């Protein structure tokens, strides 16, 4: 295995622009690592910036869907898609945010056995339906989310997080993106 974060020979821009280096330094400080997904995109700074902009908006911006719930969506979608990178990285995020390693494992293996609220279950059921057959989503599917307590704005956020991880799972799998080894042992 090479030092590249994917099976593609797309080395990072060297040197990184100052803004990008600052972002990577913040990741190193806060996470103790620079996620391989960022290193993978760093062969093209415009692509990296586009990726981080949408990721940060979807996963960190204000929403009625908590940050933990968005990570839960990432894990369940990645479980269906069998994306090793995202299961590892976002499984670790669920463990860290929830303080519950069992939750992370249950979401990876079968979210239906996880100790979650009915509202969260409805959210994950929707994410699964969207992942498996988005063309079959109809008004009763959205109404089930409303009935569980989600607003239309929340449904928008749930759909966008689900869509984003369906895209990134496919890119990660197609490029053999490997998770940082550090993720495996964290928050267990």
Image (cartoon, rainbow, N blue to C red):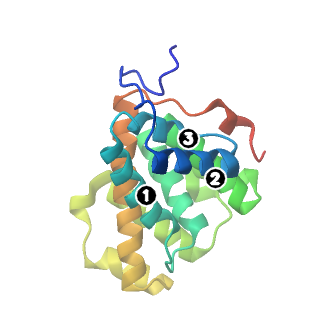
What SS does tag 3 mark?
Answer: loop
Q: Is residue 139 above or below residue 43?
A: below
Q: Residue at x 76, y 47 (%)?
A: 187
What SS does tag 2 mark?
Answer: helix
Residue 31 or 140: which is nearer the viewer?
31
Mark in front: 3 vs 2: 3
Q: Earlier in the sequence, mark 1 or mark 3?
A: 3
Residue 93 is labelled as: 2
**Side of 61 relative to 30 (left or right):** left
**Side of 15 relative to 108 (left or right):** left
From where the camera sits, is residue 158 visible?
yes
Label total for image: 3
Q: Is residue 17 above or below residue 67?
A: above
Q: Residue at x 65, y 30 (%)?
A: 181
What SS does tag 1 mark?
Answer: helix
Q: Position of residue 20 (x, y in %)?
A: 47, 47
Q: Position of residue 110 (x, y in %)?
A: 57, 50
Residue that numbered label 1 is attached to: 55
Residue that numbered label 3 is attached to: 35
């Amino acid at each position: 295995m090479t030092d590249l974060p994917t099976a593609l020979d797309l080395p990072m821009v060297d040197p990184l622009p100052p803004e990008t280096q600052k972002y990577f330094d913040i990741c190193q400080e806060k996470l103790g690592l620079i996620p391989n997904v960022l290193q993978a995109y760093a062969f093209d700074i415009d692509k990296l910036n586009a990726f981080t902009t949408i990721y940060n908006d979807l996963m960190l911006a204000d929403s009625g869907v908590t940050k933990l719930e968005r990570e839960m969506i990432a894990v369940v979608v990645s479980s269906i898609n069998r994306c090793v990178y995202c299961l590892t990285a976002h499984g670790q995020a669920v463990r860290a945010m929830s303080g519950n390693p069992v939750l992370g494992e249950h979401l990876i293996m079968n979210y239906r056995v996880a100790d979650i609220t009915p509202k969260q279950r409805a959210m994950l059921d929707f994410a699964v339906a969207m992942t498996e057959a988005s063309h079959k989503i109809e008004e009763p599917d959205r109404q089930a989310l409303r009935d569980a307590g989600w607003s239309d704005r929340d449904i928008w956020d749930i759909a966008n997080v689900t869509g984003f991880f369906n895209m990134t799972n496919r890119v990660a799998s197609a490029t053999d993106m490997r998770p940082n080894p550090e993720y495996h042992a964290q928050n267990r």
